[in-house]
Amino acid sequence: MSYAGCQGCLRAEIVDAGLIEFDAARRLQAKLHQRVRVASLDAACVVCEHLPVVTVGRAACATSLRVSADEFARRAIPVIGVERGGDVTYHGPGQLVVYPIIDLSRFGHDLRKYLAFLELLIIGMLDEWGVSGTRRTGLRGVWVGDEKIASIGIAVKHWISYYGFAVNIGTQALENFQLIKPCGMDIAVTCVNIHAGRPVAMSEARARALAVVRRGLCG
Amino acid sequence: LAQEVKMTTVVVPSLGEGVESAMVSYWYVKTGQQVKKDEVLVELTTDKAAFNLPSPCSGRVAEIRVPEGTQVKVGLAIATIEE
C-alpha cells in the first residue's frame, strides 16, 4: 500500500491499496471519510483491486443473485450488504476499483452532477487505452456498445461521498458476473482487455487511475 | 413555568437538479430516541446513491412520518424532532 500527496491539492491523500479485501477497503474509506469531514484533508481516494466478493447495495432485489448462498460459499465468494446505492455487483481480481472521498459542495451538492462526473472520468480513462466508453440515457455506469464495462455506486454522509466505481480490466474479472444480475439487469459485461487490442496489466490500470484521479479530483 | 418545546421538521433535502424524489431505505433512529445534531437519522436512496440525512438539531425523535420503502418527494416532511 502506498500513500501519496496530490499535486495541486496539498491536502489530498491518494492511496494505492493494491489487492485488498473488501472490508479492509471499507475501513480505510471510513478513516479517510472522517479526515475529510474534520477538514484535515480536502479529498482522498482509494485505488485498489478486491479479492472475489459480491456486494449488495441498498437498491438490490432478491432476484439479483442467480445462485444460492451455498453456491457462493462453495466458490468462497462472500456476499456482503453494503451502504452504497445501487443493486448487486461483483468485485474480483482483474477489476480496477476506485473510491473517491470528496466533499460534494464541490459539485453544488448535486448527486447527479457528481455521478456524471465519475462516468466522464471513467470514459477519459478508457479513451487513453483506445476504448470508446459511453454513457447511456436512463442508465448509470459506462458502456461499450450494449455491454457494461464500468459500474458506479456511491454513499454520502455529511455531504461527503464515498464508494465510487469499478472498471473491468482483465477477462478474469468477468467470470463471476454470471452468478449475479449486474445492477439487477440482464446485461452482458465486458472488459478493457477485450477492446484495447493489448493486455493492460492491473499495475498499469492502477497507475492510470491514480493519475486520472489526481487530475480529475484534485487539479 | 411550562418549558417551551420547539419542534423541528426534518424534510427531504434537494439532492440535485432533476432529482425529484428518493426512497426512504433505512431509519437509523426510532420514535422517542434522543439524537444529537448531525447524527444520521435516515438513509435515502436515489439513482445509484445512498444519502445519509443528518439531524438538523439535538433532541428527541417525536415522530417518524414515513416507513422504510416509501418513495418521498423532495421537500416532504418525514420526521419531527422535539428540541
Image: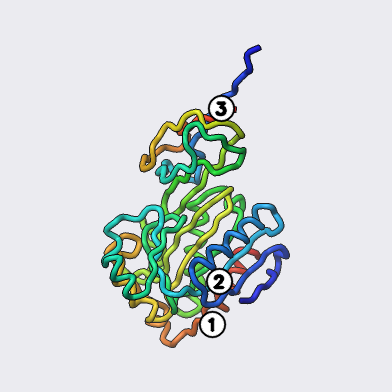
* Residue A5, x across and y down, in percent: 70, 70
Which amino acid type corresponds to the residue marked 3 in the rendered image? Answer: Glu
* Residue B67, x across and y down, in percent: 38, 37
Is A107 left or right of A56, judged from the image as shown?
right
Residue at 52% x, 74% y is: A20
| Quadrant of the image containing the C terminus of chain A | bottom right
Q: CA distance from mark 3 to mark 1?
A: 55 Å
Question: Mark 1 falls within which chain?
Answer: A
Residue at 43% x, 87% y is: A198
Question: Mark 3 falls within which chain?
Answer: B
Is A213 left or right of A151, judged from the image as shown?
right
The mark nearer the N terminus, 2 or 1, is: 2
Q: CA distance from mark 2 to mark 3?
A: 43 Å
Name the residue beneath numbered marker 2: A47
**Residue mark closest to the camera, 2 vs 1:** 2
* Residue A182, x across and y down, in percent: 34, 65
Q: Are marks 2 and 3 in contact (CB under 8 Å)?
A: no
- Same-subunit check for callouts 3 and 1: no
Dot 1 lies on which element?
A: helix
* Residue B9, x across and y down, in percent: 52, 29
Residue A64: quadrant of the picture:
bottom left
Name the residue beneath numbered marker 1: A204
Dot 3 lies on which element?
A: strand
Is A6 left or right of A152, judged from the image as shown?
right
The numbered dot on residue A121 is none
| Quadrant of the image containing the N terminus of chain A | bottom right
Name the residue beneath numbered marker 3: B82
**Residue mark closest to the camera, 3 vs 1:** 3
Q: Dot 1: few (<14), some (14–19), or many (≥20) neighbours within 10 Å?
A: few
Dot 2 lies on which element?
A: strand
